Image (tube, coloured by chain):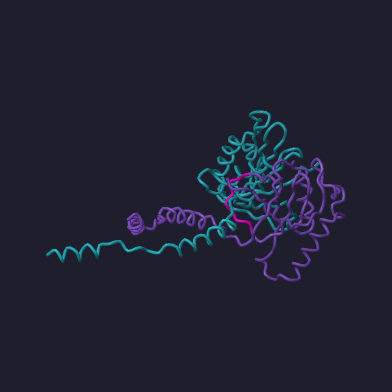
Amino acid sequence: MALGNMKSHAKQFVEPKLQITSMMDMFTIILIFLLFSFSDNPETLTIDNSLKLPESNAELDYKENIKLVLSQTVLKLEGEVISDVQDGIIMALDTENLQESSLFSKLKELKENEAQTELNPDKKKNILFLCDKRLEFKTINTLVKTAAMAGYPNFQFGVLQK
Amino acid sequence: MSKLGCHKRKSVEDADVDLIPIMNMFLVLIPFLLLSASFFHVKAINTSVPVLSDAPSVTVKENKIKLIITLELNKDGIHLSAMSDELTEAQLAEFEFNLAKESQDQFPFEQMYVCLEKIKQKYPASDTVILIPDDNILYDTIVSAMDMARYTAEKNPLFPNVVLSGKVG
């Protein structure tokens, strides 16, 4: 009798249905948000945590450029460490003789390679400076001057959009 | 009659849509998009340094006169002046302003903006500003000055060409 009761209980058991409609709604919203914020720029830009870029209302996308990163401690050209920076002084740059620096020769080399390979003037590369906002102008100016002397008088400053 | 009622009820019964494959697809898509999403939008400001040019100067009509504005950022504030081959010294003196700092670290960018707008209204062809900061001016301040000089509040071009120069002498 008791067994018979149990049997009838087992028959009544209904498999619980997982309510996934609300989860679907949530995922759809997340998916749409991510699709909108998906970077249309194929180049990914890796920025050190120590680098604090200035904020600006600029809306221009950066071009395919040579990246020069100047933080409070290090100067990098295309990811390669060029020099240490101490108290706003770029150690490998002699302000009196910028043309003797390794940065100048590397930029000059890039410019020469570019001249040999790229014939289309629209594809001319510029320099994208990613500089820490706490640096003083004298530090950035030495960098800008070196780049200009190496053949890059037009450049871009990388900023964070406000 | 009762048979018809029964039939109707059956057809209204909810059809279960199998959402599991869609969920699986979402679970793959979302981590992928999260990895490739950029939460910081890096933008660029076009700038240049002064270069020697051998372009000949030409005489132009008054509404085509181009003024080149120089903005000197120094420890006291902003010195704004204008240069042009077409105007006399006396005419250019009208556009010379000394704007004192509002506080120790606050440059008078609002006042500078008003002066720039005034110049732009009078000489709308002008589009270049030369920024000459002192050595100890912070990069953040320079970018703020560029922002103020490049576009109006309504996003119309004010002086979109910014030339960055060190102090000579």
Between B129 and A24, the residue placed more toward the observer is A24
Q: Main secondary structure of the magenta part?
A: loop
Between A3 and A37, the residue placed more toward the observer is A3
Q: Residue at x 69, y 47 (%)?
A: A49
Extreme top residue here? B103
Check the picture and name the quadrant holding the N terminus of chain B.
Answer: bottom left
Residue B92 coordinates in the image, percent (x, y): 64, 40
Give the residues drawn in magenta, as a range: A55-62
Q: Residue at x 81, y 60 (%)?
A: A106
Q: Give the quarter of the image for residue B13.
A: bottom left
Extreme front residue here? A1
| Residue B113 versus residue A26 in the image, above or below | above
Q: Give the quarter of the image for residue B10.
A: bottom left
Question: On the picture, is B32 further left or further right than A130?
Answer: left
- Whether A3 is among the magenta residues is no
Residue A112 coordinates in the image, percent (x, y): 78, 66
Question: On the picture, is A4 further left or further right than A159?
Answer: left
The mark total stands at 0
- Whether A59 is among the magenta residues is yes
Chain B pictured colour: cyan
The purple one among the chains is A
| Residue A138 versus residue B22 in the image, above or below | above
Residue A14 coordinates in the image, percent (x, y): 36, 57
Check the picture and name the quadrant holding the C terminus of chain B.
Answer: top right
Q: Residue at x 77, y 63 (%)?
A: A110
